[in-house]
Amino acid sequence: MNENYTNESGFDELEERRRARRQKRRRQVALQRAAFFLGLIILAAGVGFAAFTISRKNSGQGQLSAGNGSTGSGGTAVSTEAPRQTEAPTPQTQETAAAPAEPSTENASDASSGSVLEQARYLAAGYDYDGAIELLKTVPSYESDPEISAAISEFETAKASCVAVDVTTVPHIFYHSLINDTDRAFNVSVLGQGQVDGMNAWMTTIEEFDKITQTMYDNGYVFVRLRDLVVESTDANGNVTFSPNTNLMLPPDKKAVVLSIDDLSYYHSYEAAGYPEKLVLDENGDVKCKYISADGTEQIGDFDVVPRLNTFLEEHPDGAYKGARGLIAMTGYNGVFGYRTDSDYETQENLMEDQRKWLDEHPDFDRQKEIEEATVIANAIKESGWEFASHTWGHLSVTNKTVDELRIDNEKWVNNVQNIVGPVDTIIFAHGNDIGDWQDYSSDNEKFQYFKNAGYNFFCNVDGSVPYWVQIRDNYVRQGRINLDGYMLYQASQGATTVLDNMFTASQVFDSRRPTPVVANGEG
Ligand SMILES: [Zn+2]
C-alpha cells in the first residue's frame, strides 16, 4: 500500500531487530553485573581470607564465615549481595591465606566501578542524579577512582542545570490498544460499519504510535507520573492533602508529559479486528502480547502500548523521569489483559452474547487460573513502571449514573479488578465523562464525596481542546487528557489547529490506510 508504512514482513523484521537489540543489551548488563559481582567476590574473598587467617591465628581453628561481618550493614543492594557471595570461594587456604588481601582490592574496584558506572549512567539518564551519585558512592574508595569522581561531578553539574517543571501546564496524552492490522480493523464486511467507525476514531495504529513516540522523544518530551506533579502529605487526622510539586526537576530543554492507556482488557468485541489475544510473559519475564496474525501465525511481541513503550524506553531511558511509564485504566466486565477473570464468567449470570460464546469455546475455563495468570502479568507490568487506575468496572458514563449505581459498579471493580492489580487511588472516567464541570469539585458533589471515600484522589477526564488542563487542590488532583486517536490525528492532519501541533506534526503521523473521513464517535 503506502511505502511509508512497513508491510507485514517489514514489521516482522523490525520486531526481530528490536528483540536482537534488547537481547544484546541484556547480555551486556548481565556481563557487567557478573563482572561487578566477580569483583565483589574477589574483594570479599580477600577480606574473608584475611579474616580467616586472623581467626585461625587467634583460635587455631579456621571458620571462613567469620569474614562476613565486614560487609554487614546491608544498606544497599550492593552491600547485601556481598555477604552471600563470600560463601562461594572454597578455602584452598594454606597458600592464599598467607597472602595479604590488598592485591585483589584494586581489581575489585576496577571491575565494580565499570558496571556500577553503567548502572549509575542509566539512573542519571532518567534524571535520578541523586540515585546515581548514591550508587557510585557505594563503590569502595570511590573518591580515589578518577572515573567515578568525574561521573559524580558530571551528575552534580547536570542536576544543577535542571529547572523545576511548571506542573500546572503538563499535558496528559492517552491511547487505546494499537491497531496491528488495518485490513482487519477496518474490514466493514466482518465488523460492520459501526465498529469500523469506532476503531477508526478511537484507536491508533502501530505505525502512528511509533512515529508519535519517536517525534515526541526527539522534541524533548519526558514521561512523568501523574503523582509526580504533586506532593502528597497526610495530616494529623490521616487526611491526604496535595500541593503542586515545585521540585520536579528536568533539564531546561525537556518537557514533561503524562501518559495513560484505556481499556487494556482485549474485549471480545476486539477479537475479529486483529488486536492481541492477551498479555503474556516472555522467556525473560517481560510483558509481551500474544498476537495471532491474519494467517493464523502465533507471535509473541510488542503488539501494544505497554511492551512497545517498555522496549522504546529501555533503549531511550532519558524519555522517562525516574523510570515512569503511564497509567493503565482498567474495566472489569470482560476481564483484564485478555484473561476472563470476571465473576460473571463463573456464575454465568448477566452474560453478554460474546461472553457466552467465549465460554462455549472454552469448556475448560477456570476462573481461579485466569486470575492467577492475570495477577502475574499485573505484577510484571507494575515492576516495569506502570500504574493502574479504575476506568469503572462497566465502562460507565458516570455523568448519567446515580451515586448508588457508582457504588455498585465500584464494588464490582474492587472484587474483580483490584484483586488482580492491587489498590488504586486514580479513576480515569470512561467516555471522557466527569462527575463535575471544569469548576472545582465541591463538597456538596455527592459523586465526588463517594469516590473520595472509596479512596480515589486522582481524577481524569478527556479534553482535547486545550494543550493542558491540571487542577491541583487540597483534597484532589484532576487532569484532562488529550486523545491521540484517529479522530484527533485526522482533524489535525486536515489542517485544523489542534493541541497536537505542540507535540508533533499530525500530517506526518496520520496512517493513510485509514478510511476517511474519520468521523467523531464519542470516546471509547
Ligand atoms: Zn474506555
Image (cartoon, rainbow, N blue to C red):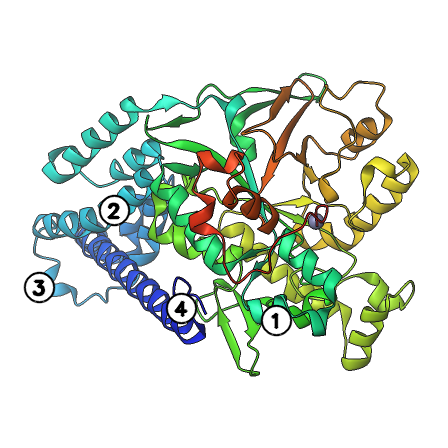
Q: Nearer the viewer, residue 247 or 98?
A: 247
Q: Which residue is mark 3?
A: 95
| Residue depth check, mark 3 versus mark 4: number of the one nearer the observer | 4
The residue at which mark 1 appears reads as 184
For label 3, count other residues whose C-alpha is less than 10 Å away and answer few (under 14), some (14-19) or many (20+).
few
What's the amino acid at mark 3? Glu
Disc with the residue nearer the chain's start (1 vs 4): 4
**Which image quadrant for residue 268?**
bottom right
User: For the point 72% across and 34% down, which residue is it?
Assistant: 456
User: Ligand 1 closer than 8 Å to the CB at disc 2?
Assistant: no
Kindly report the distance in space between the C-alpha atoms of the residues bearing marks 2 and 3.
32 Å
Q: Is residue 296 above or below residue 88?
A: below
What's the CA distance linking mark 1 and mark 2? 48 Å
Q: Position of residue 303 (x, y in %)?
A: 51, 64
Is residue 265 visible to the viewer in this orientation of the structure? no
* Tag shown at residue 15: 4
Q: What numbered label is drawn on residue 116?
A: 2
- Contact (Cβ within 8 Å) of mark 3 with mark 4: no
Q: Amino acid at mark 4?
A: Glu
154 and 501: which is toward the camera: 501
